[in-house]
Image (tube, rainbow, N blue to C red):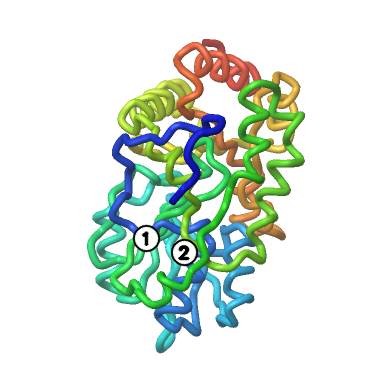
Amino acid sequence: MKEIGGYIELDTYNLPMRHNSALALNCGRNCLAFLIQVKKIHRIMLPYFLCSSVQEVCRREGVEMRFYHVDSHFYPEKIRLLEDEWLYVVNYYGQLKNIFLAEMAEKYKRVIIDNAQAFYQDPISGIDTIYTCRKFFGVADGAFLYTDAVDTFMEEKMQLDESYDRMRFILGRFERTASEFYSDYVENNEFFADEPVKRMSKLTENLLHGIDYETVKKRRTSNFQILHEGLRAVNRLELSVPEGAFMYPLYVEGGREMRRRLREEKIFIPVLWPDAAGDSEEADMAENILPLPVDQRYGEEEMKWILKKVMDMVGIKM
């Protein structure tokens, strides 16, 4: 019998959870680890334009890695898979449509889709697809994996994750400023480097059952559209407007300096793939693509403020 009485804890939420039919795990990198273990993946081809966490998983699991380039539309270039090699395709900013992803899977067969930046893009039946929660919602962890290779025995022996001790930066920013809790945020990101595959925590799953997904999707889409209408003329990227967008990628010259100047205006712009090195196109994209925030915390007023500041910096009058 569970405890009865005492002080009241967090309420239990019962709204429908998006990706409810997927395998719910503790983090995106462990969705990949699960696939590597269950499908016995020994070789994988990754994009150069990628965060180091994916490579860390492959090293940890003893997977041989090769790399490929992506073009300015984020399409993979010059793919030639070796025998038994898998192709890891990142859906950057939700710009790769399902018709293209399905063609890739049909052509190369052994394909994993990383939809970490495309939470609202539907999975394609029969294609291993990864989604993460932290990039879209106020949770400390959590990810979803669509796969036809669910290992029931492995699922049953997986430990259940616990998130209560990693929520400080989420709760703290709700009542104070991001800068006060940034170190906690970084520590939480680093925490998953050596974490084993676990099932999603009860806390994270409960919070995900409390989200109005349709309202979030509409707000993110609308915010992206506002920025795109104002900035498409100066953006080196040709973009479509994804439903429930992740961020707005503005590709301009002088990205590093613009980041600094925007930070002075309390507009914080991350470098999403700082590991892209050298004088490659990927390194240029990492430095000069500014991922502008479009998430559900903000509306038209904030988007117009961002537009004004960015357009002032590129010398365009509104």
> Closer to the camera, 190 or 205?
205
Residue 293 falls in which quadrant of the image?
top right
Q: Secondary structure at mark 2?
A: helix
* Image vertical order of residue 307 relative to residue 161, above or below: above
Give how far across and how far down residue 147 sits, in percent: 32, 67
Give how far across and how far down residue 68 sits, in percent: 51, 69
Q: Amino acid at mark 1?
A: Leu
Q: Which residue is mark 1?
A: 23
Closer mark to the observer between disc 2 and disc 1:
1
Left or right for 74, reference 310: left
Q: Are marks 2 and 1 in contact (CB under 8 Å)?
A: yes
**Residue 184 visible:** yes
Give how far across and how far down residue 70 sits, in percent: 49, 59
Q: Secondary structure at mark 1?
A: strand
Q: Which residue is mark 2?
A: 31
Residue appearing at x 73%, y 36% in the figure: 182
Left or right for 62, reference 148: right
* Image vertical order of residue 281 relative to residue 218, above or below: below
Q: Amino acid at mark 2?
A: Cys
Residue appearing at x 48%, y 69% in the figure: 158
Residue 219 falls in which quadrant of the image?
top left
Work out whether mark 2 precedes mark 1 in sequence or the reverse, and give the earlier one. Answer: 1
Residue appearing at x 54%, y 49% in the figure: 141
Query: In whole angstroms, how far apart are the C-alphas of marks 2 and 1?
Result: 9 Å
- Within 10 Å of the Cα at label 2, are there few (<14), some (14-19), or many (20+) other Cα atoms? many
